[in-house]
Image: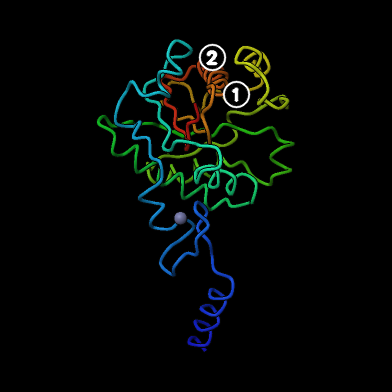
């Protein structure tokens, strides 16, 4: 019976191969979600290795933080876009978790330990989360939590207002648009803590900035920031 099951699984894999979520090539049996070639060969930023990296520079002067990193360079039409697309729009929550685990690995290789107390995902508005069925940043946070061995709090930082599409606005109007969009439900949970704020992509940093001001008002001790991808 077991042999038959294995055979059936192999036949299915032959007819409908699982594809790499980054490059689209068929995965071999031992590979999961991302092929080995892509795992080694994705456009890693190595931002975790230096404090004055482009993400940190982007955020300097706009908030106080300890560490900031993004693991991969985002390029339009590239493999990282494929990964993010799969995670956000194709329901592949497990891909978010895997990317979170890979992100944790890079953070653990930093020159100075991050020592965060807890992880907060950048929230989606309830309506959007209901439509998508999940928040991709929470999936990433869950992968990070496994790697960094610290908890995720998912209902502390919440998004109040549904913001309109961000893509066509300049930095200032984006900030205006986001201002007061985020709030904290239970200050006591995060007061005096070192918070790791997690998002999928960092572009202008406007989302991170507005979350950071809500977190600072709530009395957190330290803020660090991590994302899967960085786009200039
Ligand atoms: Zn691949």
Marks 2 and 1, Cα distance to the nearest angstrom? 9 Å
SS at circle 1: strand
Q: Which mark is residue 133?
A: none
Say whether residue 15 is left or right of residue 50: right
Residue at image x 43%, y 42%? 144
Q: Quadrant of residue 35?
A: bottom left
Q: Residues within 10 Å of mark 2 (few under 14, many from 20)?
A: few
Residue at image x 48%, y 87%? 3
Tell me: is circle 1 under 8 Å from ligand 1: no
Residue at the spot of label 2: 217
Query: Residue 39's spot in the image, x, y percent?
Result: 39, 51
Q: Is residue 206 above or below residue 47?
A: above
Q: How many numbered marks have been drawn onto this rendered protein structure?
A: 2
Query: Residue 164's spot in the image, x, y percent?
Result: 73, 25
Q: Is residue 169 above or below residue 157?
A: above
Of labels 2 and 1, earlier in sequence is: 1
Query: Residue 114's spot in the image, x, y percent?
Result: 33, 30
Q: In this view of the protein, which residue sits in the foreground, 121 or 93?
A: 93
SS at circle 2: helix
Residue at image x 50%, y 30%? 231
Q: Quadrant of residue 127?
A: top right
Residue at image x 44%, y 70%? 29
Q: In this view of the protein, which residue sits in the foreground, 91 or 157?
A: 91
Outermost residue toward the front in this view: 77
Q: In this view of the protein, which residue sits in the foreground, 168 or 134?
A: 168
Q: Are marks 2 and 1 in contact (CB under 8 Å)?
A: yes
Say whether residue 189 is left or right of residue 150: right
Say whether residue 140 is left or right of residue 107: right
Residue at the spot of label 1: 184
Q: Residues within 10 Å of mark 1 (few under 14, many from 20)?
A: some
């Amino acid at each position: 019976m077991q042999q038959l099951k294995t055979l059936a699984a192999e036949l299915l894999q032959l007819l409908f191969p699982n594809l790499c979520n980054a490059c689209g090539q068929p995965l071999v049996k031992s590979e999961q979600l991302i092929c080995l070639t892509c795992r080694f060969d994705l456009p890693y930023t190595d931002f975790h290795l230096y404090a004055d990296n482009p993400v940190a520079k982007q955020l300097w002067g706009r908030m106080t933080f300890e560490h900031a990193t993004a693991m991969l360079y985002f390029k339009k039409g590239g493999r990282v876009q494929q990964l993010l697309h799969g995670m956000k729009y194709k329901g592949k929550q497990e891909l978010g978790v895997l990317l979170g685990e890979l992100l944790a690995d890079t953070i653990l290789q930093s020159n100075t330990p991050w020592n965060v107390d807890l992880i907060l995902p950048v929230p989606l508005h309830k309506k959007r989360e209901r439509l998508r069925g999940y928040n991709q940043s929470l999936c990433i946070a869950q992968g990070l939590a496994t790697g960094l061995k610290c908890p995720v709090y998912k209902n502390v930082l919440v998004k109040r207002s549904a913001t309109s599409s961000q893509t066509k606005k300049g930095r200032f109007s984006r900030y205006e648009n986001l201002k007061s969009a985020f709030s904290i439900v239970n200050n006591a949970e995060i007061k005096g803590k070192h918070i790791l704020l997690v998002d999928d992509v960092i572009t202008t940093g406007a989302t991170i900035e507005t979350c950071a001001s809500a977190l600072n008002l709530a009395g957190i001790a330290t803020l660090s920031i991590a994302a899967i991808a960085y786009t200039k």
